[in-house]
Image (cartoon, rainbow, N blue to C red):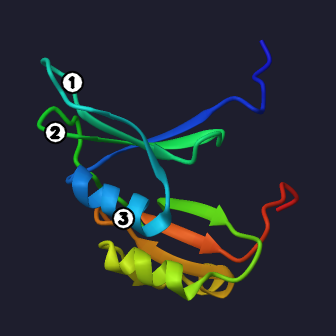
């Protein structure tokens, strides 16, 4: 079996507060709520799926009392968006006003973008670079 490289990608992670995360990713970054669900049975989670309509990926946040593990981000847990141009100061301001915290991500990422931690501490890097699989 060969996997189609256009297959949809879901990034899933635990979340302490879906409302705070929604403010950050929707009001701050501009993602859309693609789906929202509430746990209504044993072992289920509250769920928030975020992304841009038509994109080949989405971010799924799970919360609630049935989480197997709480959020535990590290400095290397990065969600990188390649903007192919300068990072708009207005966007960074919106992200911080929506509950994010601007931070240093080290010399490489600080040179090539801006890093903002979401309310759970996961890091979003807005890169000025263009993605290329040449590295």
Check disc 1 and report the residue beneath it: 44
Pinpoint residue 35: horizontal percent, then vertical percent: 39, 35
| Residue 114 shown left or right of residue 22 in the figure | right
**The quarter of the displayed image where residue 17 is located:** bottom left
Instruction: Give above or below for 95 relative to 6.
Output: below
Identify the disc placed on residue 24: 3
Residue 64, which numbered label? 2
Q: CA distance from mark 3 to mark 2?
A: 19 Å
Percent across and percent down for residue 101 are: 35, 79
3 vs 2, front mark: 3
Query: Residue, x 76% and y 73% (percent of image)?
Result: 129
Secondary structure of residue under mark 2:
loop
Q: CA distance from mark 2 to mark 1?
A: 8 Å
User: Residue 64's quadrant in the figure?
Assistant: top left
Q: Is residue 115 visible?
A: yes
Closest to the observer: 84 or 111?
A: 84
Q: Which corner quadrant of the image does residue 9 belong to? A: top right
Crowding at mark 2 (Cα within 10 Å: few <14, some 14-19, many 20+): some
For the C terminus, which image quadrant?
A: bottom right
* Towards the viewer: 28 or 108: 28
């Amino acid at each position: 079996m060969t996997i189609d490289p256009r297959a949809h990608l879901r990034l899933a992670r635990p979340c302490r507060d879906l409302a705070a995360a929604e403010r950050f990713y929707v009001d701050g970054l501009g993602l859309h709520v693609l789906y929202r669900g509430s746990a209504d049975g044993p072992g289920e989670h509250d769920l928030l799926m975020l992304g841009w309509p038509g994109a080949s990926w989405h971010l799924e946040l799970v919360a609630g009392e049935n989480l197997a593990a709480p959020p535990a981000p590290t400095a290397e847990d990065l969600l990188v968006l390649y903007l192919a141009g300068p990072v708009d100061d207005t966007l960074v301001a919106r992200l911080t006003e929506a509950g994010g915290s601007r931070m240093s991500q080290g010399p490489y990422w600080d040179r090539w973008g801006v890093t903002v931690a979401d309310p759970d501490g996961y890091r979003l890097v807005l890169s000025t670079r263009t993605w290329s699989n040449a590295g």
